Image (cartoon, rainbow, N blue to C red):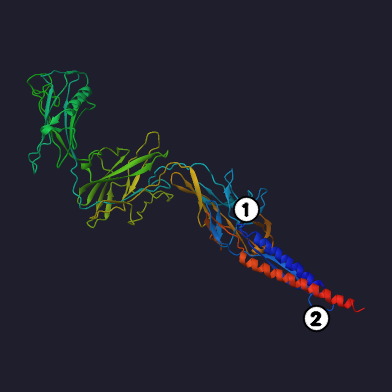
Amino acid sequence: MSFQQGLSGLNTAAKQLDVIGNNVANASTVGFKQSQAQFADMYAASLAGGSGMAVGTGVKLAAVAQQFSQGNITNTNNSMDTAISGAGFFQLADQSGAILYSRNGQFQVDKDGYVVNNQGHQLQGYQATAGVVTAVQGPLRIDPAPLSPKQTSNMNSIDGVPIGVGVNVDSREAFPLGITQATVTGIAVPGLTITAGLNDTLTGTVDDFPAAAPPVVGATFSVTIPPGTYTTTAALAAAVQTAVNSSTAGADVSLTGTGRSVTVSADASGFLVMKSNSGGLGASALTVAGNAVDGAASPNNLFGGDPLAVPSTIPAPVDGAGVFSLNAPDSYNRSTSLTVYDSKGTQHIASLYFQKAASNTWNVYLAIDSTSVPATGTPMATLNFSTSGVLTSATPYTTPLDPLDPLATAPLTDSTQGNTATSIIADPTYTPLGALAMPLAFEFSQSTQYGGAFGVNSLTQDGYTSGELSGFSTSPDGVLVGRYTNGQTQSLGQFGLVNFTNPQGLQPVGNNEWVETYQAGKIPLNRPGSSGLGLLQSSAVEESNVDLTAELVNMITAQRVYQANAQTIKTQDAVLQTLVNLR
């Protein structure tokens, strides 16, 4: 008769209670994996071998096996907290370089920018260069440097994309009234003296089309030039312009009012130039009546021909065709704008003006910061549409070369139409003050001319200003994404995960960490979501997988087992006492 069986039962029950107590204590520990006490029976060894009548000698603790089942995932307010959903372990390196593994994703950034856990152990993963995750493995470090600005690129740069313009121009729209222009050029003699009541009056007519249908009634003007001696043509032009600005036309309509203006200037050759810019159907007209420069009867004129000719002839005005003006809404149908960026990240407003030129043709004008590009009144592009409203061509255009072609001779293909990119407009370069030139390109393949209201479907460009790092998040595949104050995001690195063929072969060392043993069978570091590894969830942690209710039930069971084993010892003691009392 032996007490051994009962004693072994007491010992193993006590060990089971220890395991249960440890599980209960860590019920709130993030990333903790519960353990299970596993037992084995014992038999005495014999030189004669085993016997079918052998009685066991008790029980022993065979193993304390950790259970690596998935714990519940709970959201947190820390963007660096990361939970693993599925298989895998975070790989960490301590201060001595030793490698450890954990399921606890409570991370933070230390003073040097490294991603660490509460013990200061550095998280291992894939490093990034210039926003691109590489295959280089090592500690993850977040670079706090600001994001450099990116200039709005053109199609021929190595990473360039054109400015995408997707609009619908309304096929029902009427032609704009437009701005038309007429010019009269003449000669003024430097040193000219204007005398009151002698040669100080200048008269003329703006917009007089008696042959038009219906006839356009002109506005007759009469201005008085301030008396004095004008040593330069520019000074005389300024005086005439001042007089024009203060005068009125017939019916008291200002020559500088909405839709009508008369400008006076001096060109490099000493000629006075008068221009009429007016809104209306057809071309502008401008005539200037005689004005004697010397007070003589001959009609020598401020805007005359050769002043030595007798008599001096007044040149015929040159009537202008349809002209576009940024400041004249009647000269275009619709407009839209977007922000572009120069090499310093400075914002510039690029405005596009759409002017109907024919039934299926539209002119597009460009202005950057209210400056016409490429030149005043010159359309950047002409869009041609089919009778069904689909864009057929955009002219003039430059077929960009494919930047990925090492020989740079293959034309880029329009991704929408599947042919040579005739909808891409290479615009003349705009150079902001103090910055690099901005060679822009516009792509109109998404533009249409349907019988619906004008609408902007897309305006895209790839530039941005500089930005400071403002936050982080982790994508499901482990890419650590930085958010910047300019609205941009950039990859800062990628988490790595490690798995084991036998996770129970890992040796726990505390602090929610394990070290590798020979029995674990390590699978090398890989990216989340690959090689059977789980995915990650940002701003979340994996809770302990301890089932507290089950553990409390197990505790009751272990207590009953302990009591039962104690009872066997008590019974053995009573039997032994009986034998002793036989004497």
In the displayed orientation, state which residue is furthest to the right: 583
Query: Where is 554 relative to 426, above or below?
Result: below
Residue 437, image x, y percentages: 38, 38
Label 1 crowd (10 A; few <14 / some 14-19 / many >=20): many
Residue identified by numbered label 1: 92
Which type of secondary structure does the marked residue at label 2 adopt? Answer: loop
Give percent across and percent down for residue 36. 67, 66
Left or right? Give the position of 325 relative to 437.
left
Q: Nearer the viewer, residue 11 or 96?
A: 11
Amino acid type, mark 2: Ser
Circle 2 or circle 1, nearest the eye: 2
Work out whether 233 lies above or below 569.
Answer: above
What percent of the width, then of the height, locates residue 565? 76, 72
The image quarter in which residue 41 lies: bottom right
- Kind of residue sitting beneath label 1: Leu
Q: Secondary structure at mark 1?
A: strand
Where is the C terminus found, in terms of image quarters? bottom right
Nearer to me, 68 or 187: 68
Distance between mark 2 and mark 1 Cα atoms: 52 Å
Q: Is residue 45 visible?
A: no
Residue 24 visible in the displayed image: yes
Residue shown at 66%/68% (left/top)?
A: 554
Q: Answer with the quarter of the image where residue 370 lies.
A: top left
Kindly check if marks 2 and 1 are in contact, taking CB atoms under 8 A apart as contact: no
Q: Is residue 82 left or right of residue 428?
A: right
Q: Quadrant of the N terminus?
A: bottom right
Look at mark 2 in the image and give the residue it sits on: 51
Tag of residue 469:
none
Q: Residue 311 lies in what quarter of the image?
A: top left
Residue 574 against residue 257 in the figure, above or below? below
